[in-house]
Amino acid sequence: MTTSRLWHGFTDMSTVRHRAPFTITRGQGAYLFDAEGRRYLDASAGLWFCNVGHGRAEIAEAAQRQMSRMAAYSTFGDYTNEPAEQLAARLAELSPTDGASVFFTSGGSDSIDSAIKLVRRFWLALGLPDRRVILSRENAYHGGHIGSTGIGGIALDREGFGELITDTARVAWDSAEDLEKTITSLGAERVAAFVMEPVIAAGGCLFPPQGYLQAVAEICRRHGIVLIADEVVTGFGRSGDWFASRRFGVVPDIIVCAKGLTSGYMPLGALIVGDRIAQPFYDGTAGPFFHGYTYSGHAGAAAVALATMDIIEREALAQNALSLETRLPDLMSPLTDHPMVQEVRTGQGLMAAVELNPQALRVTPGLPMAVVASMREAGVLTRSLVGGQIQFSPPLIIGNSQATEFVDAVLTGLNTIPPQRT
């Protein structure tokens, strides 16, 4: 076997380096195909990103048309291009954030790091340099860069790197009261921003308690703290609307997005920045924001995003996610009584998780990966999340039959594991 030179992210390379790689060669709709032509349901939409499904020729054609004219050029200074301008205008219009401006990045981790730098620079421009603390939630995943890892709420992701970023603190993922208490303890005059995923995704698919999002938004408003909504996962139809913030009547100061923006057809991310935060940079108070990326406003990527958003709108994919949200509890009910299942979590939009029984996880720590491997043999691709959950976040084009296909594969996976001693 030829040795692969590909280093896989979030992977113990000692466990895969001598195995034949699992090569995916093409995708069509909600399905993927391997090198032998076998079909698999994509139950995780790649990594939460392929909202419109695979093999969309019109997206490839949009990229070809733009890139045959001009693939990219810097957007520093006064340089711009038509697709970036059109996309910025469209995102600002769809955002619940008033008077928004759009700052483009290359992905979600870029966008979180950009937001951290932006809010710290914002408070410095207003003469409040002590407002540096970035608050986030336990269990939250915000990306893989130094800043985004440093504020993340998954301890395993931070281990072994030392202190990546100073002036951070984490609060309970499900308690607005804990946010208020932490702000009081630190002093609101020291807190720059609160970063939150409307639904915690990679940290376990955790849905917010009733009224939580509105409560934390009010707390931030009252204390003048910048509210950053990390909608890298929940944006572009996944939550049943263009943005979860919009669905639940929350108006963040900054919305961070990526993934579904292009459905993974090209790398692209963005900050949708409200007028309050942008104003000091636009009126000359703050001076230049010395930050940006080589591919900020990439013309080809922006053309892909516009074509992706056309599909989401034309095919009413957010509405399909909203409709499936109401049906998922019934569709996934066969899993609820299985002895190795602790909970089946469904909630806002087309996102769900099957949490495995803690006792079974103690007896067999590798159980989640064993179930995922068995599901792959049964023709369904997904992954396990932190804490022992099986992820379900398929392309938004699916119907009842694909949800049932996922449930059947989970049951197959669970039933191939020998019974656990209690």
Image (cartoon, helix red, strand yellow):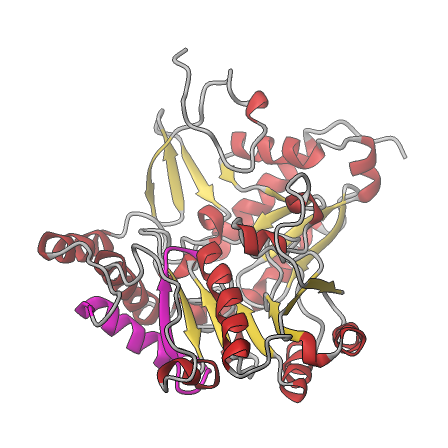
Highlighted range, magenta: 79-107
| In the foreground, 421 or 76 | 76
145 sits left or right of 155 in the view: left
38 sits left or right of 381 in the view: left
Q: Relative to residue 126, is residue 321 depicted above or below?
A: above
Residue 159, by quadrant, is: top right
Residue 383, by quadrant, is: top right
User: Residue 50: horizontal and vertical position, in percent?
Assistant: 40, 53
User: Where the C terminus falls, by quadrant?
Assistant: top right
Q: Relative to residue 170, is residue 21 depicted above or below?
A: above
User: Residue 265: horizontal and vertical position, in percent?
Assistant: 32, 51
Q: Relative to residue 5, is residue 54 depicted above or below?
A: below
User: Residue 150: horizontal and vertical position, in percent?
Assistant: 62, 54
31 sits left or right of 149 in the view: left
Q: Is residue 211 visible?
A: no
Residue 339, by quadrant, is: top right
User: Residue 268: horizontal and vertical position, in percent?
Assistant: 35, 57
| In the foreground, 209 or 419 | 209
Name the residue furthest top: 1
Question: Residue at 48% of width from left, 48% of height from top?
Answer: 47
Q: Relative to residue 52, is residue 184 depicted above or below?
A: below
Q: Is residue 401 visible?
A: yes
